[in-house]
Image (cartoon, rainbow, N blue to C red):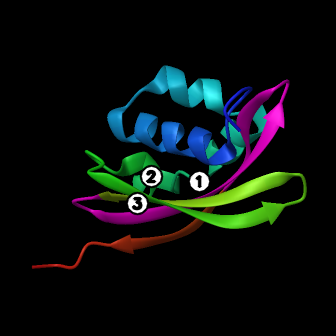
Amino acid sequence: MTNGPGSAREAAERNAQAVMSGNFNQIMADITPEALAQMMQLAPQGGAGLSLANMPNITGYELREVGTEGEGELFHVTFSSALGKATLGATWKQVLGQWKITAVTLVGTEPAAAD
């Protein structure tokens, strides 16, 4: 599709780039209030453990299309940093003609191997 709102994958790529570069405005434009609330609950209590919230200097990401979930499209995005990796599941749906993250889950974390 060349016209219109683009694809869910294009939106997911744009959002992953925004997370990696710290583009808060783009991140907020891509997420619904409900998904933002879910994202906030993913932060570890007391700051212990590895999560996307406490990863310094994200150095890369890998985006994988998982399939459909209801009316949405589910992607897993794995962010990498010196501390390790964190994988999020993001469900993207069209909301008022724009692709938005409507649900977020933590798929898993993988601490970096100690040297």
Question: What's the mark number on residue 42?
Answer: 1
Q: Is residue 26 above or below residue 79?
A: above
Q: Which residue is mark 2?
A: 52
Left or right: where does residue 77 sit relative to residue 23? right
Q: Which residue is mark 3?
A: 48
Query: Outermost residue, right direction?
Result: 70
How far apart marks 1 and 3 lie (CA) works out to 12 Å
**Quadrant where the image shows the N terminus:** top right
How far apart marks 2 and 1 lie (CA) works out to 8 Å
Per the picture, the main secondary structure of the magenta-coloured stretch is: strand
Res 33 quadrant in image: top right
Nearest the eye: 4 or 82: 4
How far apart marks 2 and 3 lie (CA) works out to 12 Å
The location of residue 22, given as percent across then percent down, is 37, 31
**Residue beneath the point at 62% across and 46% down:** 39
Is label 1 or label 3 in front? 1
Instruction: Check contact, mark 2 vs mark 3: CB within 8 A.
Output: no
The location of residue 28, given as percent across then percent down, is 59, 26
Instruction: Check contact, mark 2 vs mark 1: CB within 8 A.
Output: yes
Amino acid at the residue labelled 1? Leu
